[in-house]
Image (cartoon, helix red, strand yellow):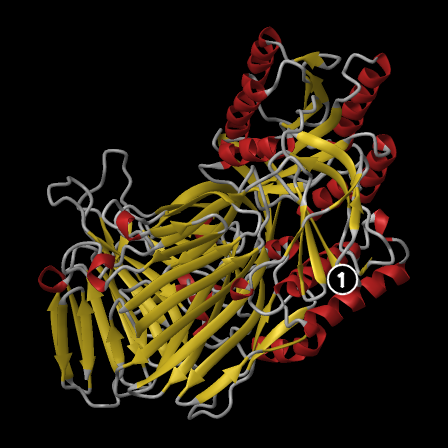
Amino acid sequence: RIFLWWGKVNHWFNFPPSLWLLLTHIHHCVYSVKVDCKVTSRFAHTVITSIALNKANISREIFFEVDLPKTAFITNFSMSIEGQTYVGNVKEKEKAKKQYEKAVSTGQTAGLVKASGRKMEKFSVSVNIAPNSNVTFIMTHEEMLKRKLGQYEIVTRVKPKQLVQQFEIVADIYEPQGIAFLDAYGTFITNDLLPLVEKTVTDKKAHISFSPTLDQQRKCPGCDGTLIDGDFIIKYDVERTVTIGDVQIVNGYFVHFFAPSDLPRVPINVMFVIDRSGSMMGNKISQTREAMLTILDDLHEDDYFGIIVFDSTILEWKDSLTKATKENVIQAKTFVSRINPSGMTNINYALMESVKMLKKERQDRKQSERSVSMIILLTDGMPNVGESSVDKIQENVRNAIRGNMSLFCLGFGDDVEYSFLDVMARQNKGLARRIYEGSDATLQLQGFYKEVSTPLLSEVDLRYPDDLVNSLTTSHYKQLFNGSEIVVAGRLSDNNFSVKSQASAQDWDLLYPEQEYIFGDFTERLWAYLTIQDLLSKRSWKNVETGTEEEKANATAQALEMSLRYNFVTPLTSMVVTKPETEKGPEDPLIADKLTEASVKSVQLEQSVVSVDGDPHFIIEFPGREDALCFNIDDKPGTIFSLVRDPLGGVLVNGQTIGDKKVAPNGKMNTYFGRLGIVHQALGVRLEVTTQDITVSQDGKQAKFYWSDTVTKDRSLTVTLRDSVRFLVILHKVWKQHPYHQDYLGFYTLDSHLLSPSVHGLLGQFYHGVQFEVRDLRPGEEPEKPDATMLVKGHELTVTRGWQRDFHSHIRKGDLVPCWFIHSNGNGLIDGNHTDYIMSGLFKTV
């Protein structure tokens, strides 16, 4: 039979049992979701447990997806099915590589971890479940909470995509120093849900819970849509004393938290070095200007500052640093507001001049002896004029700075060579940060400046008696900023020890956390977490402070050994998940890897959303890069195109265009998809979707439904084909009295990795990857839409930066997706010509 589900309306049809076609928003039932987070002394241990039910009389693929912080290490994953538990094993990445490549070569999605926005990674796995059975997923991850701007933050992303019978988030926090403040809220929490966020805070402990009932989760009374869609956030800080730290000891390991309070602010001498090359055109330069206006207001009168903007050459605001008086700040704002992009990118020249200017100020002794000098570089691209070798630029900057100032690098957008900036910043007592393109880019820039603009101490060196401690994590830090914290951990040979800082030596009060709040040997695991992070940093071959190649190799070997011993999924290890056998036989293991900032950029097309919507706009999205490719197809109304054709999987999707009611005054006739034909050949099923109705056919039997009779206000339909892909169809309603436009359909592909490598069509050809490179950004015909050169499939194309709307997450308004637009009906990107995809009928393959 066929089951159709739109909101509250259910329909059943007595088709032969071989037919398994599900049209629904939900392809399985998630019965329960529980997030249990325990934090002891900033170390967070989070367990996510989910139970999913298959209530159908046939087997189904059940999906488990979790978003976790990028700074977290996965430590455990298991699936329990019919009394059998399948546990993920952490292995050396090289040993898991062959399994990974085998799975990829057969068209499977082998990678379990993908980038998910700016701060998160997505862990996802699916398993085939027998009829009327359930599966329990359990995933554990651990992370050290990092203090920024005077607070710690715990982010739990929850996107169940359906109502959940039992939903609960629980967090227990224990801080021996005492809790100074705590707040908990959700980006999705309405005024009605706010009372459900329960907080109990005592001196050293906090308990937070959020557990809405089924009805409280609903978007509206009787609706099946859920309000639970976003981030649940806990922010807190601990009590600070006038001393400069505390030590906590558990089972022979110690952790020392160093965050002195009430230290006077240190004046800064700061050079702002701003890229104004052609690639900064549009939102990037306008958001940079806006951020700089606020940053200039944040300068203190005892600070000195200078501004250099650069493209092929440089332009200085003034030839020396200037005191941040009100009058000078006003003048600087005028200069910043007039920055306009053009030309190429000469990073080396700009940095060399900024270093010279800071050195000259020091020599002239204009600033306070206590002041700290820094350079803040903002760029969105690679050097392409003057000195263009990144290795040489790094060498030049390092030799010029010589440890006398800090360099902070901001990389704007996905196309920046982040590793170049990251290494250069670390070599010069600084750090790098990627600024993501988006409406909040201004806030990202301002936030970064607030983090680094208040140095309290430089060259912090914490020393411990050699005969009492060993296996220390990093104990020397270039700088300590206001609102941050230094954490050092190590092994103890004696419970009585002292610590020496640069300025003083004293005996420290020792804190012993209460046993009920300790999850295993938390101090040992915290020490292991920090040690692995240190070793991974040392293995970077460009980090000049790591010593010889032999020492780097030893650091890699030690990091690998500790990752395996403590069951951490790190950049050196993989978690291998062996799925249970199905009727098709055993399945290849799936692999969970740890992403790095550099690896995110190399993701080309994994679990992408490929769609066609609008006039008709084809969009291939890259979630890991927050980027997309797009193109239009212009042809006469009534043309039928092949969208998806998988001869091995037996899946076919064709679409027929419709036109406007009449030609617009500008002479343009817009076309849209108004009719879709979907075929599952093995089952003999045909589905025809128009803007009026939906018709399902098999073996001469037919059933028809009307959108107006069955569909709730979101006007969407999800089609799930047995053992295969899911499609989302959206009906876009247009005002009936509109003089030109009429209703049309949007078509989105979900779980495209389930189709075979032979899949093709205007959409299908992109399901298993497309390699491309964008270079040579330059002004376009419109100021907000720069042009660039794209290398793809052996072609060199001129592409234009633009925006399209994606409606699959927010059906009413859609989301604006930045994309590279390929002109001329996608020629050069699609295989062949668009006319090669014209079909003779809605269910035809020729």
What percent of the width, then of the height, locates residue 119? Answer: 53, 51
Q: In the displayed structure, does residue 425 sit left or right of residue 167?
A: right
Residue 612 locus on image (x, y percent): 35, 56
Quarter occupied by the N terminus: bottom left
Quadrant in the picture for residue 354: top right
Disc 1 residue type (three-letter): Arg
- Whole-percent x, y for residue 154 in the image: 49, 52
x%, y% of residue 358?
A: 79, 21
Residue at image location 73% in from the left, 37% down from the top: 479
At numbered mark 1, what does the secondary structure look like: helix, strand or loop? strand
Q: Closer to the camera, 368 or 380? A: 368
* Residue 80, above or below 690: below
Q: Residue at x 25, y 85 (%)?
A: 19
Residue that label 1 marks: 491
In the drawing, does residue 760 fall left or right of residue 525?
Answer: left
Q: Is residue 358 above or below residue 191?
A: above
Q: Note whether residue 100 is visible.
A: yes
Q: Nearer the viewer, residue 604 or 438?
A: 438
- Residue drawn at x 28%, y 34% is 666
**Can you say which quadrant of the picture contains the C terminus?**
bottom left
282, 441: nearer the viewer: 441
Residue appearing at x 75%, y 54% in the figure: 537
Q: Relative to residue 661, is residue 357 drawn left or right?
A: right
Query: How many numbered marks, from 0 up?
Result: 1
In this rendered view, identify the residue nearer to me: 479 or 66. 479
Crowding around mark 1 (Cα neighbors within 10 Å: few <14, some 14 to 19, many 20+) is many
Farthest residue toward the left? 709
Tell whether 512 sits left or right of 677: right
Quarter of the view holding residue 651: bottom left
Instruction: Please determine whether, in this image, residue 563 is positioned above or below residue 418.
Output: below
